[in-house]
Amino acid sequence: LQNLDQKEGYYDVLIGIFTFTVLNELVTINVLVDIFGHRAFESEFLKDERILEFVYFSEAGEVVPRSSVAAQFILRRVSDPNITVDVIIKIAQRLDELRQLSGLRQQYSSALHGLVQFGQLQAILPYRNDREQESVIFRYYEAIKSLNYCSGDPQFWLQYAIAATIFDKLERAGKYFATSYALANKDPNYDYSKIDNFAAFYKIKLACQKSSIEHAMNIFREARDIILRQMQSGRVHYPYRVATSFGDFFDHFSRTLSVSELQEVIDAAQFVRRKIGGVPPELMVNANVRRCKAAMERICNQGLDLQTRKMNLAKIGKKPN
C-alpha cells in the first residue's frame, strides 16, 4: 500500500473499491470510470500487480475484492487517515453529481445513502483512537453537508445529529435534530419514527448533563413520552434500545429525586417491563430487548428500595445518604 500510495492515480481507486465493498455495493469498471475517470480503464491499472493483490477483474467487468474482511481492515486500520477521508469525500461529491444525471439516479443514490449513514461510516472511515474518530467523522460530514443530496434531506441531518450525540456534542446535536424535524415537516407523509427514536436518546443524554432536577425531569418526560408512544405502535426493538438509557438517568439522579419524581421513573420502567413481557419470542431474544429488560428490572428493584428509604427518613426528618 505504501508503494501504491507513491504512484499517482491508483491509490484512491483502490480505496473506492474497498469503500463500495463495505457498503455491499456492486463495483464494475464502468462504476469506477464514472467516479474516477478514464484512469480506471487504463491497462496499466488493470494489470498492476499491486492492485491485483487486492482485487481481480471478471470477464463481465466486475471488480471483486479478494477479501471483504481485508478490505474493511485496510480502510479502518492500514490506510492513511487523511488521504482516505479526502478520497471518500470526493467519492460522495462525485456520486452526488452522478445521481442527478438521467438514468443514474437510482444506481448512485443507494451508494450515497450508505455514505451518509453514521453506522456505515464507523465501518469505513479510519481512526486510531476515539478522538481521531470524532475528528474524521465531523470533518467528513462538514465536507458533504452542502451536497444536493444532503442539504435538504432530513435523514442526513438525523445521521449528523446521531454522530454529535454519540460524541457528546449535544449542543450541535440539538441543532441538527431541529434541522431534521424542520425538513421532515415539509413532507405531510413523512415517517418521524427514526428521528423521534434517536431524539429521545439525545434527550436522555441531555437530561443527565443538567444540574437542575426540575429541568432534567422535564427533558426526561419528553423522552419518556416519545419512547412509550413508539412502544404502543409496536415498532420492533428500537424503542427498547433507547429505553435502556432510563438506567443512565436513574443512576445519575435517583438519590436527588423526590419520592414523586422517583415514582415517575419507576412507573416508566414498569410500563416498559410490561411491554417486554408481551413481545413475540423472536423479539425477546434480541440483544437490545434483553438489555432493556435487565435495566428496567434494576430500576424497579433499586428504585422501590430507595423510595422506601426516602419515605422512612422523611418521617424522622433526615435525608438519605
Image (spheres, grey):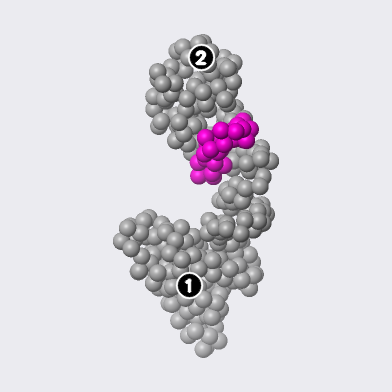
Which residue is labeled 1 in the image?
Answer: 268
Q: Nearer the viewer, mark 2 or mark 1?
A: 2
Residue 247, given in percent of the width and then of the height, sits at: 48, 64
Q: CA distance from mark 2 to mark 1?
A: 60 Å
Left or right: 285 as drawn, with respect to 190 = left
Residue 33, given in percent of the width and then of the height, sits at: 55, 22
Per the image, label 2 sits on a secondary structure element best described as helix
The residue that appears at 40% across and 18% down in the rendered structure is 59
- Residue 120 in sight from this viewpoint: yes
The residue that appears at 47% across and 17% down in the rendered structure is 51
Q: Taking 136 as reference, is 10 above or below it?
A: above
Residue 103 falls inside the magenta stretch: yes
Which residues lie in the magenta part? Answer: 94-122
Which residue is labeled 2 in the image?
Answer: 45
- Residue 167 in sight from this viewpoint: no
The residue that appears at 66% across and 40% down in the rendered structure is 148
Q: What crowding class fits label 2: few (fewer than 14 Cα within 10 Å), some (14-19), or many (20 or more)?
A: some
What's the residue type where badge 1 is placed? Ala
Q: Taking 136 as reference, is 163 above or below it?
A: below
